[in-house]
Image (spheres, grey):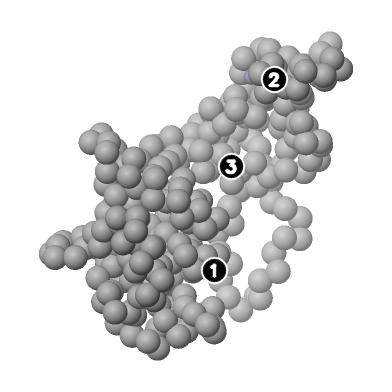
């Protein structure tokens, strides 16, 4: 008997949009999408993610109720002197999709992220913003902020987005992310838009690009509004602390007084 998805009862394949295919005759119209849980139940990837809130709270299969979490054998390598941190659950699955087979995929992180985003939909655009930042997609960053400015129903304002701390990523702000990814353009853009750093502390090229694109100093002459330079992550690090961790040439930003 062919297995089907325990959630939607369809075969464990997904149909490709014909418009995404070339016109070759022999191309498959479907690709596998088969997530096998430790209990033996199969799901489509998205069908299981749709159950993420329940699974994260119960750690059980939404179909047969079997407890799913396992501890990865021999995973602990921390020294015995420090108290062990509470480990995240591990849900090892066997996943087959278009890209091939992953025989031991821990899906707990994906489920935890999806459960969080389901409960906190305002975090979705902010997470998307951080992804653009980490990739140095400066144009995309500007466009996303413009979209937020133009949308009165946006859950976070552009100012809130600039200073937002990602609970799924150690409380890092966009500036933490930009620095750790060494995306220099993104760093300058975030400082320009989201800090009260003095104009004379910016490289002339940055000032010219900002002026040419009509990018405002959003905090200039504004009393409230969180300065991105002083946002701390969960470890208490400001952007300046990250610069010092990165070493040269980033320490020069701190030594030049940009963060004070
Ligand atoms: Zn399904
Ligand atoms: Zn099951």
C-alpha separation, residue under disc 3 versus residue under disc 1? 26 Å
Disc 1: which residue: 182
Disc 3: which residue: 110
C-alpha separation, residue under disc 2 versus residue under disc 3? 23 Å
Where in the figure is residue 250, as x and y percent of width and height? 49, 80
Rendered position, 240 above or below 92: below
Q: Which of the two labelled residues, at mark 2 and mark 3, occupies the earlier sequence position?
A: 2
Which residue reaches farthest right? 26
Q: Nearer the viewer, residue 51 or 12?
A: 12
Rendered position, 92 above or below 211: above
Q: Residues within 10 Å of mark 2 (few under 14, many from 20)?
A: few
Rendered position, 158 above or below 16: below
| Residue beneath the point at 39% across and 45% down | 143
Q: Secondary structure at mark 1?
A: loop
Q: Secondary structure at mark 3?
A: helix
Where in the figure is residue 152, as x and y percent of width and height? 23, 36
Where in the figure is residue 56, as x and y percent of width and height? 53, 39
Viewer-nearest of discs 2 and 3: 2
């Amino acid at each position: 008997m062919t297995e089907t998805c325990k959630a939607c009862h369809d075969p464990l394949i997904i149909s490709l949009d014909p418009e995404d295919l070339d016109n070759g005759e022999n191309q498959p119209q479907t690709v596998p999408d088969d997530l096998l849980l430790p209990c033996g139940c199969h799901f489509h990837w998205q069908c299981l993610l749709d159950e993420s809130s329940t699974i994260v709270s119960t750690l059980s299969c939404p179909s047969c109720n079997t407890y799913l979490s396992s501890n990865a054998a021999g995973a602990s390598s921390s020294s015995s002197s420090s108290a062990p941190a509470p480990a995240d659950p591990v849900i090892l699955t066997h996943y087959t999709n278009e890209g091939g087979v992953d025989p031991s995929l821990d899906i707990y992180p994906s489920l935890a992220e999806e459960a969080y985003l389901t409960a906190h939909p305002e975090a979705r655009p902010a997470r998307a913003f951080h992804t653009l930042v980490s990739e140095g997609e400066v144009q995309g960053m500007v466009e996303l902020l413009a979209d937020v400015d133009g949308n009165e129903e946006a859950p976070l304002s552009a100012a809130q987005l600039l200073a937002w701390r990602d609970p799924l990523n150690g409380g890092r702000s966009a500036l933490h992310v930009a620095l750790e990814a060494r995306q220099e353009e993104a760093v300058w853009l975030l400082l320009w838009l989201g800090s009260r750093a003095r104009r004379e502390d910016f490289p002339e090229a940055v000032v010219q690009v900002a002026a040419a694109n009509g990018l405002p100093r959003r905090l200039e002459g504004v009393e409230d509004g969180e300065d991105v330079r002083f946002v701390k992550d969960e470890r208490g690090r400001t952007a300046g602390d990250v610069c010092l961790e990165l070493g040269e040439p980033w320490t020069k930003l701190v030594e030049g007084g940009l963060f004070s």
